[in-house]
RNA sequence: GGCGGCAUAGCCAAGUGGCUAAGGCAGAGGACUGCAAAUCCUUCAUCCUCGGUUCAACUCCGAGUGCCGCCUCCA
């Protein structure tokens, strides 16, 4: 089955066909590195991480480029404020970016180009635009002449009259048209600057993406991604620059992720409802944050509330418990390339058909414009179905469990990264018996209390045994009686 | 003012021109338990309003209402 993607330019769902059969050229707008990354950045990163991984899962080789805007007004302002060099600021936040993204289990892109490291490409690109008559020089600065590019507005679906009606742009008398945008900006005294055929200065915002995508991926990209809020003016301007210069379609498929709201309001610094990734990671695991993002369709707006996160945490715990159950059932059997045929040979056709059904459904959702929410739904749908099927396997239960475990993990860990295999293995040790052997003093004490309580229970002294259980609960230790004994876990 | 999007159970959230409208959380009932917890099983919607197209619409079209985003830097 082919993959269908929603393309912002044509405003339609279309079948995905890359230019080269097996290689995908993908460019996603990264961040301007003047501050910490927030939940909105996380959403874009997670969405395109999964999209990229899914293409790879389908056998494509993805050449993914994510840029850093490491010079612009905001960075310069911040540098002035902190009395530092602009590049000091940007490199600090680039480091922070990678810290956050690594924690969120974002697979590294193929390239992370920085604007400041491609000044010569940018200048060359601007020169090309001037030569072709799409750009003009004013006082050492260069502007793109929007009226020269007939298709300007095709991505954001606007025209000049509509845009002038909005009239919230400051009119610069030097410009031929108020919508002309800056390609090269002259430096003010003391600002970071580079030599150019015009005044000493720095590139405008939009030009870096055109120049760097061209440098790494060529004239036409298969996919260009970014947040919905970048459609205008950023992506509109990129199209104008790239198509004006190269005379070819810039992008085959434009993909835009929806924005994040907080308590139904737009998340923004001015409203103060702003969540940084590092701040969120103190309260919620990376798995839950990813699960939050992926349980909505990537193009829809998504609303963040702490209550919802709690709800999702419980929901995700259900999946984790299922995986732990499989882990126990499979005993020591681990499916790998060497034993896969042997294991499959032992399983009934019925079980294999159910797994196949699940995978078919999961993939059907993913192939339909990366519907992760639907795909996750199918994960839940098949948990009881597969549980039952495994129990029917009689002597081969452990092989059945190993098989299902490996199939589920391919999606949950490998693709969506909402369940961490290490976490499943690690949490196994919250068993009281193991805890008693543990060197931790607290755990030894809990083990002792559990032992005392077991004796009280044997004497039917429920009043005292409940006192112990309730007392532990008050300090966040939850006891659970099972046939094998009492387990405990610590409530976060 | 211009452009675009959304409206599905108590809440969150997929989806489809006709077949049982996924799934999660919460709730209800049951099993298990000394009682709990956890777990398992069962159960819980006719899809904003009004028109139209159609043999058939929640799904397509039109109007209305409501919410949201973009039009200025923004993932």
Image: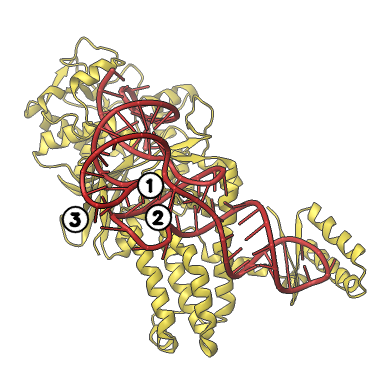
Residue wearing tag 2: A372
Helix, strand, or loop for circle 2?
A: helix
**Disc 3 from disc 1: Cα separation:** 21 Å
Q: Upstream in the sequence, badge 1 or badge 2?
A: 1
Name the quarter where the N terminus of chain A is drawn.
bottom left
**Secondary structure of the residue carrying numbered label 1:** loop
Mark sitting earlier along the chain (3/1): 3
Q: Residues within 10 Å of mark 3 (few under 14, many from 20)?
A: some
Query: Horizontal and vertical percent for residue A161?
Result: 19, 18
Residue positioned 72% across, 73% down in the render: A434
What distance separates the C-alpha of mark 2 from that of mark 3?
Answer: 22 Å
Q: How many marks?
A: 3
Residue that mark 3 sits on = A18
Chain letter of mark 2 equals A
State whether residue A375 is above or below residue A67.
Answer: below
Q: Nearer the viewer, residue A349 or B21?
A: B21
Eye-nearest disc, 2 or 3:
2
Q: Secondary structure at mark 3?
A: loop
Residue A451 position, x and y percent, is 85, 71
> Which chain is home to disc 3?
A
Tag 1–tag 2 contact (CB < 8 Å):
yes
Which chain hosts label 1?
A
Q: Position of residue A436 (x, y in %)?
A: 77, 71
Q: Residues within 10 Å of mark 1 (few under 14, many from 20)?
A: many
- Residue beneath disc 1: A298
Q: Dividing the picture into quarters, in which one does residue A8 lie?
A: top left
Chain (yellow): A
In the picture, measured across the screen, residue A382 lies left or right of residue A178, that is right
Q: Quadrant of residue A163?
A: top left
- Specify the chain shown as red: B
């Amino acid at each position: 089955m082919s993959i269908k993607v929603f393309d912002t330019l044509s405003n339609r769902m279309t079948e995905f066909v890359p230019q080269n059969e097996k290689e995908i050229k993908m460019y996603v707008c990264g961040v301007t590195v003047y501050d910490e990354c927030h939940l909105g950045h996380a959403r874009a990163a997670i969405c395109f991480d999964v999209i990229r991984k899914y293409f790879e899962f389908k056998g494509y080789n993805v050449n993914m480029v994510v840029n850093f805007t490491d010079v612009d007004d905001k960075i310069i302002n911040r540098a002035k404020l902190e009395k530092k060099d602009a590049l000091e600021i940007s490199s600090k936040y680039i480091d922070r970016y990678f810290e956050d993204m690594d924690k969120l289990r974002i697979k590294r892109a193929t390239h992370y180009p920085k604007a400041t490291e491609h000044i010569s490409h940018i200048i060359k690109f601007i020169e090309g635009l001037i030569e072709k008559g799409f750009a003009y020089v004013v006082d050492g600065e260069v502007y793109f002449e929007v009226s020269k590019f007939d298709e300007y507005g095709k991505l954001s679906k606007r025209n000049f009259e509509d845009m002038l009606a909005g009239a919230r742009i400051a009119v610069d008398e030097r410009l031929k048209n108020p919508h002309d945008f800056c390609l090269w900006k002259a430096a003010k005294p003391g600002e970071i600057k580079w030599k150019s055929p015009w005044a000493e200065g720095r590139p405008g915002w939009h030009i870096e993406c055109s120049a760097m995508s061209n440098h790494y991926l060529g004239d036409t990209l298969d996919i260009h991604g970014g947040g919905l809020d970048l459609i205008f003016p950023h992506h509109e301007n990129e199209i104008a620059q790239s198509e004006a210069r190269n005379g070819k379609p810039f992008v085959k498929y434009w993909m835009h992720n929806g924005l994040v709201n907080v308590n139904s309001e737009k998340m923004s610094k001015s409203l103060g409802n702003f969540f940084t990734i590092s701040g969120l990671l103190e309260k919620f695991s990376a798995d839950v944050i990813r699960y939050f993002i992926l349980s909505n369709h990537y193009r829809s707006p998504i609303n963040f509330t702490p209550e919802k996160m709690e709800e999702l945490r419980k929901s995700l715990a259900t999946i984790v418990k299922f995986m732990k159950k499989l882990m126990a059932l499979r005993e020591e059997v681990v499916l790998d390339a060497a034993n896969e045929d042997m294991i499959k040979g032992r399983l009934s056709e019925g079980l294999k058909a159910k797994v196949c059904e699940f995978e078919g459904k999961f993939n059907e959702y993913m192939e339909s414009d990366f519907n992760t929410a639907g795909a996750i739904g199918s994960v839940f749908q098949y948990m009881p179905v597969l549980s039952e099927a495994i129990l029917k396997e009689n002597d081969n239960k452990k092989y059945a469990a190993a098989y299902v475990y490996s199939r589920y993990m391919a999606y949950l860990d490998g693709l969506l990264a909402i369940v961490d295999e290490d976490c499943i293995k690690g949490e196994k040790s919250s068993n009281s018996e193991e805890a008693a052997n543990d060197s931790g003093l607290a755990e030894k004490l809990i083990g002792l209390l559990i032992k005392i309580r077991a004796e009280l229970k044997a004497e039917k002294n429920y009043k005292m045994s409940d006192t112990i259980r309730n007392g532990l609960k008050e300090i966040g230790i939850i006891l659970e009686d099972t046939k094998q004994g009492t387990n405990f876990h610590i409530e976060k």
